[in-house]
Amino acid sequence: MKIRGVLLDLSGVLYMADQVIPGSPEALARLRAAGLPLRFLSNMTRYPAEHVRRHLAELGYEIAAAELFTPPRAVRGWLEAENRRCSLLVHPRLEPEFSGLVADEADVLVVGDAAETFTYARLNAAFRRLMQGAELVAMGDNRYFREPEGLSLDIGPFVHALEYASGQTARVLGKPAADFFHLAVADMGLEPGEVLMVGDDVESDVLGAVRAGLQGTLVRTGKYRPSDEDRLAGTDAWVADDLAAVVDRLLQK
Amino acid sequence: MKIRGVLLDLSGVLYMADQVIPGSPEALARLRAAGLPLRFLSNMTRYPAEHVRRHLAELGYEIAAAELFTPPRAVRGWLEAENRRCSLLVHPRLEPEFSGLVADEADVLVVGDAAETFTYARLNAAFRRLMQGAELVAMGDNRYFREPEGLSLDIGPFVHALEYASGQTARVLGKPAADFFHLAVADMGLEPGEVLMVGDDVESDVLGAVRAGLQGTLVRTGKYRPSDEDRLAGTDAWVADDLAAVVDRLLQK
């Protein structure tokens, strides 16, 4: 099926550890010139979207606010569509992204990567909301990530803690959840089958997108390892050396 | 098989919310007079054993230190038998219970109910120990407990967080793990089949004990609900109105 829109992972596709991946800026410019709508997908919920955009700008990537599709944005859209309000267990600097949607006694609890603000008191307060009937919505379920000083706990372990305590299963609105890809696709006014997801994480980016009915491409940059390709057997997903090779193939079609 | 030793749960068998259960003090005195060795089992790891004993003494129950079998005691015994050392993610007031067994770079990580000292920094440090190869040992996996101000997170959610992050499955040394019952039984110099476990929690006390090869009795005090009895179908466990009725039956045999 013809590709009418593209979703792009950030780290590992556009840059790696503060270094631009050679060829990616030009490839992105060619995609834009072809008029394809784009969304940039990040599971980052430790910092607000503006922080992510500023970081990209420092690397030379100018991304419009409307093009950055993050879990807080997915959650906002979902809350608005369902006409619901939430209480928050997120990093304080992320709270402004939920302005107008927070209410006492809300029946949704939204969890983000609260980092050092995951305290026992805050986790307990969130748990009590769940036991009073609030629905658990998680902005991802990643296990950990690498920081300069070592591996650090991501959002997933805390979501699992609340799931185990409450007996609930979280609605995940972050990669690789199908709901998240569908919200990003709808944000472009397209259907899942018309959209290609490009990423370096075989599970979170590529298989997540394929399970959600999108097309998927794994790039051999970033965290890619050759054994990842075996996991794509039996799917229509394809592999490309880097973003430049993806765009070559897309635009020659 | 003849009963040669008895394991007793505390809350719900001897007392409920700071009130002695009528008949339990006299029943316990009759058990002692019959010369049966006893162990009192608690999963409490938020306070040290001495705190538990003092609380029991305030209620009129005099329990020898050697009779109180707690997860820290089980862990000590296990570490000593395996000649291993540990690092700790426990409440600071519990640390003295591990004196002589703590070492930097230890290949065991022991987790207790650290309550408000479950901080992101401490959880992260524990996670990094696990990713460096330490084995996860948990002093229970209870989900939550009731406090005057509401439900509170117990140790289990934090153990599950570390399991999910690290990909490990914890060795649990607390009820209802068979290892814990076996250590308590061995502490009396008996075999599992000769020992009766009495408790008000059908899962944690009675089914846990039965799965570990002990005999089990559910009392209709404490958190008991009539539907609990259905869960004992197909086992040899029996039900009694209270500890007094258990002792009546034991001593008439």
Image (tube, coloured by chain):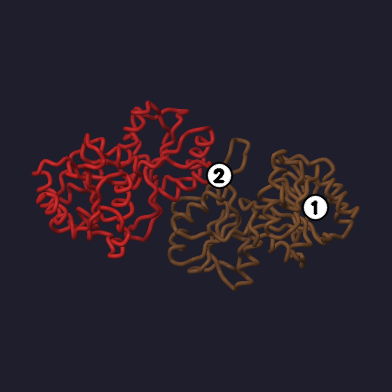
Chain colours: A brown, B red
**Image quadrant occupied by the N terminus of chain A:** bottom right
Q: Nearer the viewer, mark 2 or mark 1?
A: 2
Residue name at image x 87 percent, y 47 percent: A26
- Figure check: A234 above or below B134: below
Query: Relative to B102, is B105 on the left or the right?
Result: right
Residue name at image x 77 percent, y 60 percent: A195
Label 2 marks a residue whose chain is A
Would you say the residues marked 2 and 1 are in contact, meaning their CB atoms lie under 8 Å apart? no
The Cα atoms of the two marked residues, 2 and 1, are separated by 30 Å
Residue ranking furthest to the right: A252
Specify the quadrant of the image occupied by residue B48: top left
- Which residue matches tag 1? A62
Badge number at residue A153: 2
Q: Position of residue A144 (x, y in %)?
A: 58, 44
Give the structural element (helix, strand or loop) at label 2.
strand
Badge number at residue A74: none
Looking at the image, how many numbered discs can be counted on the residues?
2
Q: Position of residue A45 (x, y in %)?
A: 62, 53
Q: Amino acid at mark 1?
A: Glu
Q: Nearer the viewer, residue A165 or B227?
A: B227
Label 1 marks a residue whose chain is A
Residue ranking furthest to the top: B83
Query: Relative to A105, is A146 on the left or the right?
Result: right
Q: Residues within 10 Å of mark 1 (few under 14, many from 20)?
A: few
**Image quadrant occupied by the C terminus of chain A:** bottom right
Query: Relative to A251, is B224 on the left or the right?
Result: left
Give the structural element (helix, strand or loop) at label 1.
loop
